[in-house]
Image (cartoon, helix red, strand yellow):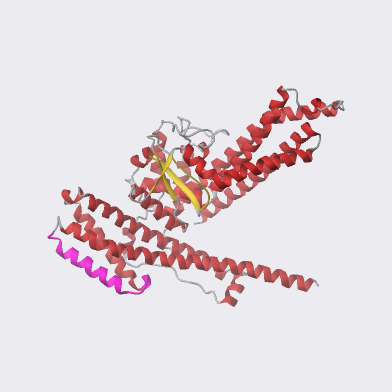
Amino acid sequence: MWITGAAGAAVLYGAYVYNGLVRKSENVTNGWSQIDVQLKRRHDLIPNLVETVRGYADHERDLFERIAALRSEAMKSASPAESGETEARLSGALKTLFAVSEGYPELKANSNFLALQEELASTENKIAFARQYYNDSVKEYNIAVSSFPDSIVAGMMGYRRRSMWSIDVPDERNAASVSFPGDSAGT
Amino acid sequence: MASFDRLITHNKRVSIILFIVMTLFFIVVGAVVGTYFAGSWQGGLVIAAIIGGVYGLIAWSQGDSIVLSMSGAREIAHSDQPQLWNVVEELSIAGGIPMPRVYLIEDTAMNAFATGRDPARSSVAITRGLLEKCTRDELQGVMAHEMSHVRNYDIRFATLMAVMVGAIVLLCDVMRRSFLWGGGRRRSSDKGSGGGQALVALVAVVLSIVAPILATIIQLAVSRQREYLADAAAVELTRNPKGLISALNKLSYDIEPLEAANRGTQHLFIVNPLKGKKLGRDSIFSTHPSLESRIARLEALSVPSRTAE
């Protein structure tokens, strides 16, 4: 009698754990697709931005070409995993573009440019936040998958550890608006 | 990461304890009202349950719209305030929650609040004064605080607490008024059973005065805890405590009261909208911890990095 009871409790607990795993795994998937959405959004914004800047700063042609090349290279890859490094370089090039535009007061007064600048800055933040959410979700998921007793259910259902998003290009990390306690001086 | 987890667990525990205390309190008040009026505590519980239920239903279905319209908030779209909209959208991505509705309050006082019942139906509002005086980083800190209220279900909890306090206040009001009219069982052709009757009357009188005050103190204690938690959770979202710290500093210099706020909505805002003085010591009657202690706690937080383990 009590064996049946214990078995029933085990099944219920297993179902509870399983549901948790499904939810955590879905968070990871959603986080991943959000990164993709935001990268595409950035690709869409770039041509407009470059056109606007070109009207005021025509002799920055090298930079425009570099951005265009990086953009089309990034757009060729099927998933954010492949394009990670290219996207990182694209972020860097856009930063240069905004730094360069500081030198053109007329451009800085153009409302179209200002709107595009806000949209692009926001998209950069969204990419960074989407990665942050993705990594947080992977961390939560991995802890669930590898800690006992949840690991038993995870193993039976084929849930395996997933990898975090890490970027090796140092420039990219600076591009995101991350701040650490150490660099709080000044601001 | 550990410091956030500990803080969140601690706050959840405190909130649950306070919620249980509040429920017990509500039951006691209901029972005393019942004993005093009808001579049966069960009857009082039924009355209390009905009042609580009606309050709760209204708050559940209309609470957010009532609060928003009382505050004179106007819903905006991306094209009205692109930066504000973008900042909120960024944070909804960071927190993995749906995009809330965004509202603007045309007032030069500096403040912001969140309301709703869960992340799927939530609203954030900010005054024009705060919006215009904040840098992008500061705005991000402020909105991250509000989004944390949404994410932590503080908005639901605040509504729930407001309903319970409101119901207790109403019950006690009815009871107190009835004393003035010489109500209670004496009216109902009851010959009275002497001492027992007097004791019930005495308890009822004391309770009707003390209960609303106690209920308010409990509500405010929860409110203060939740402010600390929302500050910490905001930094967990933005990974940038400097934005929120500098926004709170700016807020501490703003002494203008927000006309559209009142006693019923004050606990929702990021800083108390009514009092001019926002620094100084905490008291059991403040809706918010002092800005000094909030800033001190934020400065002590260890900030997790975005990518590394």
* A72 drawn magenta: yes
Residue occupying the point 36% across, 48% down: B84
* Image x and y of residue A167, in percent: 36, 67
Q: Is residue A136 visible?
A: yes
In this view of the protein, which residue sits in the foreground, B61 or B270? Answer: B61
Side of A49 relative to A150 (left or right): left
Q: Is residue A148 visible?
A: no
Magenta-colored span:
A58-81
The residue most toward the left is A59
Main secondary-structure element of the magenta-colored stretch = helix
* Image x and y of residue A98, in percent: 23, 56
- Using the image, determine if residue A159 lies above or below residue B46: below
* Image x and y of residue B196, in percent: 84, 29
Which of the 4 image quadrants contains residue A81?
bottom left
Which of the 4 image quadrants contains residue B165?
top right
The residue most toward the front is B189
- Using the image, determine if residue A48 lies above or below residue A163: above
Which of the 4 image quadrants contains residue B189?
top right
Which quarter of the figure is the C terminus of chain B placed in? bottom left
Residue occupying the point 77% across, 32% down: B37
* A168 drawn magenta: no
In this view of the protein, which residue sits in the foreground, B170 or A62? Answer: B170
* Image x and y of residue B18, in percent: 64, 43
Q: How many discs appear?
A: 0
Side of B106 relative to B4 (left or right): left
Residue occupying the point 33% across, 66% down: A40
